[in-house]
Amino acid sequence: MKKLDADNKNIKLGRATQIKPRSSNVPRGKKRKADSVIKEKGAVPSEKLVNLQIPPTLKKQLVDDCEFITHLGKLVKLPRNPNVDEILKNYLDYRSKKDGMVADSLKEILKGIQCYFDKALPVMLLYKSERQQYEDAVGDDTSPSSVYGAEHLLRLFVKLPELLFYANIEEETLLELQQKLVDFLKFLQKNQGLFFLSTYHVAEDVETSTNNQDN
C-alpha cells in the first residue's frame, strides 16, 4: 500500500476510470447490468489485473447503487453511519477476535485502503450528480472516509485491480494482498444489511439536510 501511495501520481485519474452513468443503449438484463457497472471500456486487459471476485449480492448492490443515482435521481444521505473509517476499524476488530491477534501487514493494508479511498473518491468514485453534494459535505479539514460509507467504499473495490496494476507490485506481495482484500469483501457481504443503505434519498432532501440552497 505504501508503493500504491507513492505511485498514485502515475495513475490516470478522472478519465476512463471515472464512474459514468450507463448509456441508454446497453442491454438491461441483470447480468449485463452488473457487467456495465463493474467493467469499463478502455481499462487494462482483465488478464493483467488482480482478480477481486465481488460476491453476487455486492454486485447487485453496485447495480442498485447505479440505478438509484443515475436513473432515479437519488443520493446517499450524508454523513453515513457507519462511515468508512468505522467499517475498517470493525474489520480490524473482527480479525483480532477471530485470529487472536492482528498482523502489522493487515493494519498497513487497511491504512492503505483508507488513504486510497480519500484520494480516489473525488476523482473516480463519484457520479456527476454527486459532485455538488461532495463539495457541500467534505471540507478542507474533513476526510471523505469520515463522511462516506460502504456504498462508496464498494465502488473503490471495482477500481482497485487497475490501481494495483499501475502500482507494479511484486507478484508474491500482490497475491497476499489479494487474499486480504477478498476476505474484506466477504466481511462486507456478511454485514451487508448493517453497512449498506436499502434506500436512497431524493437529491432535494439531501441538499436540505446539508443546508445547501439552490438558486
Image: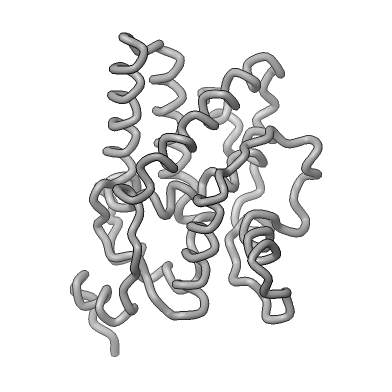
Relative image position of residue 158 (x, y in whole percent) = 58, 47
Determine the residue positioned at 28% across, 17% down: 97
107 lies left or right of 207: right
Residue sitting farthest toward the bottom: 215
Nearest the viewer among 178 and 169 is: 178
State whether residue 18 is above or below residue 88. Answer: below
Determine the residue positioned at 61% across, 32% down: 7
Relative image position of residue 101 (x, y in whole percent) = 33, 9
Count of numbered badges drawn on the protein:
0
91 lies left or right of 152: left
Determine the residue positioned at 46% across, 32% down: 184
Nearest the viewer among 201 and 30 is: 30
Q: Is the image coloured rainbow, by chain, by secondary structure, or in one colour?
A: one colour
Relative image position of residue 86 (x, y in whole percent) = 27, 38
30 lies left or right of 154: right
25 lies left or right of 56: right
State whether residue 44 is above or below residue 184. Answer: below
State whether residue 50 is above or below residue 122. Answer: above
The answer to which quarter of the image holds residue 41 is bottom right
The answer to which quarter of the image holds residue 130 is bottom left
Determine the residue positioned at 59% across, 71% down: 21
